[in-house]
Image: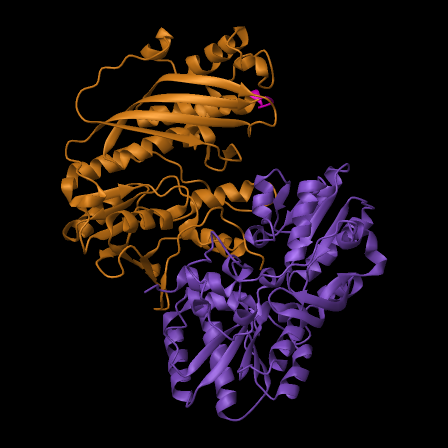
Amino acid sequence: MKYLSEFRDAAIVKTLLNNISKTVTRQWNIMEVCGGQTHGLVRHGILDMLPDQVRMIHGPGCPVCVTPVSLIDKAVELCLEHDVILCSYGDMLRVPGTEMSLQKARASGGDVRILYSPLEAVEIARSNPDREVVFFAVGFETTAPANALSVVRAKQLQLTNYSILSAHVMVPPAMEAIMDDTDTQVHGFLAAGHVCTVMGLSEYEPLVEKWKMPVVVTGFEPVDLLEGIWMVISQLENGEHRLENQYKRVVSNQGNRQAVELVKKVFEYRKRDWRGIGEIPLSGLFVKEEFVDFDAAIKFKDIKIPETVDTECLSGDIMKGKIKPPECPHFGSKCTPEHPLGAPMVSSEGACAAYYQYKMQS
Amino acid sequence: MSKKLDFQLSCPMPEMDFDTITIGHGGGGKLTQNLLKKGVFSLLDNEWLREQDDAATLSLNGSVAFSTDSFVVSPIIFPGGTIGDLAINGTVNDMAVCGARPSFLSLSFILEEGLKMDDFWQILVSIREACAEAGLKVVTGDTKVVERGKGDQIFINTTGIGYVHPKAKMGVKSIREGDAIILSGPLARHGIAIMSKRKGLEFETQLKSDTRPLHTICNQLVDKFGDAIHLMRDPTRGGAATVLHEIAGQSGFGIDLFEKNLPIDEEVAGACEMLGLDPLFVANEGLFIAVVDSAIAKQFLETVKNWQFGKEASIIGNITEEHPRQVVLSSIIGGKRVLPQASGELLPRIC
């Protein structure tokens, strides 16, 4: 078992596609919540292999895309004007702020460092005691535990020069927001496998019951995605609505309790503004009072950043699945990965980037 | 490996005035002379360098290839090589894929104040070894030192001159529909080996850079297949995807690429998954991509496979008149997608 090639097996893919074709009798709209799943679908050419009756709607699960412009502006300001060492995951670098992205800030002299782990940022803080180090804590439930751990570690080390700029968002409230939208045409969800790896399944039962629709926790490889789609369609065709777990090799019912406890220890839920979508209640993770010394939003609260909105980017409509990226009037013309109008065109999990990069352009 | 070790043992660093490079080493005075005499001149000694003139005088006849490249890799010493052999092999390979055999080289250093003398010596030794392997002479060069913080330890520029094989008739204009595209070996080893040692990214791997000179195999192929080889390129920075895009863009043809034929080590594939990178976009230093007449494709492939580093060579795609200027990849599962163009810096993914 190599956990990779088996899930990209052409014969199994063919069988699953056949199963889907045999099962489906009418048009169904399925939303894959996670941007990683969107990229899997497009990168492996799966969208064009599915029968016409299966319409995939690309969800809001790109944490980079929904990070408010004001937070990016703040990060830019911190490293350019306040001599902060700004540490970030690589995804965040190209996302446009009001004036510039972090990549441009780095080119303008800002000390921006790309890291894989926030614990490296703690180490940077330890070895640079005379500099402030801020980690741009972006992501869904997947990255939250590691970011929480960095705060705990910094506290243990009694560091006074480390803080995180939390832009964390949670998946279930976003799914609720989508379903609350009267224009929504989603019949079933592929829930984000890695988010559930951390959080477990319990948060999704109430959603299934409330909206009477199938939710299948799904992985990211072609076999995972197609099996997840088949499971949703099987339920829909049978008039059922259940929570199912396609991604059992990774996701357990209870999730990773230790990780969840860590998140609860450091963060609390509050309303959060989602770029392009708007405010969603209890959808953001904010640093608790107990760890306030490690909260960059408080530590640098005197840096006022005006709220701005994207005037031309239709990312909200894209992320709610109302339009597909090529239906945006700016797609590929005014908006490209090199000159993006909004985040979905630059993030590695953004739907616009997936379409721009991988879909045939006629 | 043993060869390299023996060589280094037999080539100990001479007594130097300093443990590190100082601004004075670039001043042109005694320190510079000492550094050159004990370092560059003694290791790379040949009749041109011995002259120590401001310019090397060469006698050239026939068709000559001329190529330059700069090297800024970090870390400067990595699994499988150093910035030194990379700088030699890089220019050798740029010429090799044009059907040229490199003969003469210029070698220029920009050193940062504080560079460890031990590291500089190791780099010089690797340069000497790479020059010997490629059969070329360093005939001119330059050394400058910049203040600490103004460079990244060491930058190297090399420029090469070499004779072009008379049978070489390569160029994008020679490309025809149906031509086969052959890749000489497994993708992304260099980039992943470098990344595994880069600060902040360190991870355990046995991988080594694939840096190596390609002139012998390229010359052999040109000699054997002549004008049936329509184009050769070495996919370095930007990876194989960037070269394929160049070929599609410059020739006006489309390219069909088959994911299942792409040679990728398991370890590289795993590292790329972990880092969120596509091996087609990761750098290589010892590979070439050839576009050849389909009639000789199998023979060409066999010849490459007989080369000691070509065992995993593969026909990875072909030239088509469909979808002009686009590279379309047939995925392992049979789906199709456009291979995107690299868009600047390779950025790792969040999750």
Q: In the image as oriented, which residue stretches furthest toward the front?
A: A311
B147 versus A315 height, above or below: above
Q: Is residue A82 left or right of residue B219?
A: right
Tag count? 0
Q: Is residue B141 left or right of residue B100?
A: right
Q: In the image as oriented, which residue stretches furthest toward the right?
A: A290
B218 versus B264 height, above or below: above
Q: Which residues are magenta?
A: B113-117
Q: Quadrant of the N terminus of chain B?
A: top left
Residue drawn 37% across and 51% down?
B241
Chain the render paints orange? B
Q: In the image as oriented, which residue stretches furthest toward the bottom?
A: A239
Q: Nearer the viewer, residue A294 or A194?
A: A294
Residue A321 image position (x, y, % from top left): 52, 74
Majority secondary structure in the magenta region = loop
Residue B145 image position (x, y, % from top left): 53, 19
Residue drawn 74% across and 38% down?
A131
Tell me where residue A274 sits by quadrant. bottom right
Chain A visual colour = purple
Residue B304 image position (x, y, % from top left): 25, 44
Tell me where residue A287 sits by quadrant. bottom right
A108 versus B338 height, above or below: above
Q: Is residue B116 on the magenta stretch?
A: yes
Q: Nearer the viewer, residue B140 or B36?
A: B140
Residue B63 image position (x, y, % from top left): 18, 26
Colour mode of the rendering: by chain
Work out whether residue B203 can be spotted. Answer: no
Q: Quadrant of the C terminus of chain B?
A: bottom right
Q: Is residue A330 on the magenta stretch?
A: no
Work out whether residue A242 can be spotted. Answer: yes
